[in-house]
Amino acid sequence: MAEGWSFTPGKGEARWVVRTRDGGYVVTGWTESGKEGSDVFLARLDKKGNRLWIKTYKGNGYSCGYCVQEVNRGGFIVVGDTKSKNGYDHDVYVVQTDEKGEPLWEQNFGGQYCDYAWSVRQTKDGGYILAGGTESFGAGIYDVYLIKLDSSGQELWEKTYGGKGSDCGYAVLELDDGGYLIAGNTESFGNGNADIYLLRTDPNGQLIWQKTYGGKGSDYAWSLAPCRDGSYVIAGEKEVAGRQGNILAACLIKVDRDGNELWEKTYGDGSAGSIYAVYQEGDGGHVLAGKKESTGGGYDIYLVKTDKNGDSVWEKTTSGSGFNCACSIVPGKDGEYVLAGRKGVEKSSQGDIFVLQLKEIEKIKPALLLCAGVMAAVLVAGSIIFLKRKLLRS
């Protein structure tokens, strides 16, 4: 797999990338801001990865964007967290912008403790649904936090779900009936220390059912995606036996529309890893993106392609130093992949924001590869193998 264009504007981390209606991309995350800690950033790229504009939003300081969506009427909605006005904890932070990233409104939600929004979707009525976690409200240490907003950012209702432990929602989808499906983690229910948590609500946020998945160890969900057959896949990590004791391995679970588990798969060949993003391709398989433990002690960017049954077709990792991670992935227009995340810096805890286009070599014309810096081409068993300066390794 070969690298195409890349976008690296500075220190920080990209958390979410979306392909826009014009074929370009919009990205959010956080960027360093000196003594203020971090700002939310929003970057707009054209289809070739060229920067059109980049904006930052301070909130109350130490702010981060976790998810962005393009709004039907134009512009973007970003959710994340920002420092509370009391200066100690965090509140849910929401920014609605126009098509050029200029803020139209900003809102904070939460109570006297830590509250976060990790996922947002525009709803059929033109408003928004946010999912995250709250320490301020609910029954336990943390609870799943669901907030419904109108198109102007005014709160219509909020709900919490969970038990006496720590529970959090990391992904939300609106269903055909107007209800919601939330995926996250629970320490209040299930079999182990932490379990994957899936909840379904009606359009008013009333709980219809909840399910847990996992064994006696710890299992975590970070991403949720619909399938064309009406089922869903949940991506994350699962505690399994590794080469030198238990590890958290990349995993994918498929469930039917009622939350019944159809299958579960793990990946990584005994190495620790996690999946933070997933989507279904036209062949019924899935593309997964996240991180995998490297031989040097850090983490590499990790990609997995599966068939429709969740079995691995191929797995790829980057080569790099430090702690690297793909937090989000979307398909490009011509079958390529566009990833967003963090690239590590050698001998440093810091990282760089990155958005990266990757192309499968067999889909690229040899002439184009040669012009892009290919060093050699070798014919082996009827297949052309290109040796390029920038490659992902199997």
Image (tube, rainbow, N blue to C red):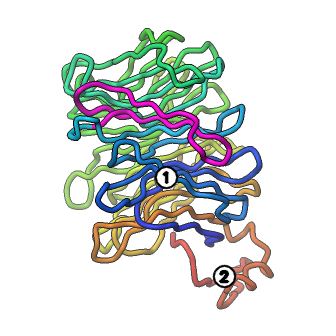
- Under tag 2, what secondary structure? strand
Q: Nearer the viewer, residue 33 or 188?
A: 33
The numbered mark at residue 225 is: none
Mark before the other along the chain sequence, 1 or 2? 1
Q: Which residue is mark 2?
A: 386
Q: Is residue 255 left or right of residue 332?
A: left
Residue 115, image x, y percentages: 31, 31
The quadrant where residue 142 appears: top left
The quadrant where residue 297 appears: bottom left
Residue segment shown in magenta: 90-116
Disc 1/disc 2 C-alpha distance (Å) = 40 Å
Q: Nearer the viewer, residue 147 or 199?
A: 147
Q: Name the kind of residue labelled 1 in the image.
A: Thr
At horizontal 28% and vertical 36% (from top left) the residue drawn is 84
Q: Which residue is mark 1?
A: 56
At horizontal 71% and vertical 59% (from top left) the residue drawn is 46
- Under tag 1, what secondary structure? strand
Residue 241, image x, y percentages: 26, 51
At horizontal 63% and vertical 54% (from top left) the residue drawn is 44
Can residue 253 be seen here? The reply is: no
User: Is 3 located above or below residue 301 in the figure?
Assistant: below
Q: Name the kind of residue labelled 2 in the image.
A: Phe
User: Is 29 located above or below residue 258 in the figure?
Assistant: below
